[in-house]
Image (cartoon, rainbow, N blue to C red):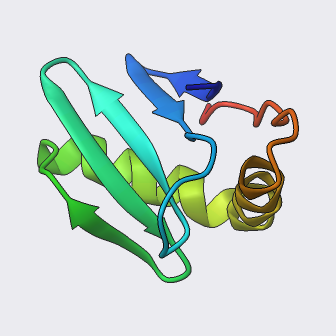
Amino acid sequence: MPRVSEFYGIAVYMYYKEHAPPHFHAIYAQYDTEIGIDPIRLIEGILPRRVQSMVFEWAAMYQTELRENWDLARAGLPLRKIPPLE
C-alpha cells in the first residue's frame, strides 16, 4: 500500500486495484478511515474532529492529484507523492 503523503501524524495511503468509489485511506493513531475523493467525504471509519478537518482541507487542496493517483493505482502504475498539509 503506497503512502502518498504524511503530515501531523496522519498517513495517507492508496491501495492498488481498489474498489469504487475513488478514495484514499487516512490513518491516524488507532483510526483507519476511507475518504472519498469526489466528493470529499468520510466513507468508512472515524477520525477525531480536528484530524478530519485537516484531512478534508488537504484533500480539497490536492483533489486533482488524488484523482490522478487513483487512476494510476487502478492501472497498477507507480503513484506520485503529494505534498503534506503545512
Say which residue appears at 49% left-offset and 83% top-offset.
39
Say which residue appears at 40% left-offset and 46% top-offset.
54
Say which residue appears at 75% left-offset and 33% top-offset.
83
Q: Position of residue 2 (x, y in %)?
A: 63, 25
Q: Quadrant of residue 70?
A: bottom right
Say which residue appears at 51% left-offset and 23% top-offset.
7
Name the side, left or right, on which 2 lies relative to 28: right
Name the side, left or right, on which 61 lies relative to 28: right
State the quadrant of the N terminus: top right
Name the side, left or right, on which 81 lies relative to 12: right
Q: Of 58 and 22, which appears nearest the observer?
A: 22
Q: Is residue 75 above or below residue 22?
A: above
Q: Position of residue 30 (x, y in %)?
A: 12, 21
Name the side, left or right, on which 38 lies relative to 65: left
Figure disc tally: 0
Q: Position of residue 69 (x, y in %)?
A: 77, 51
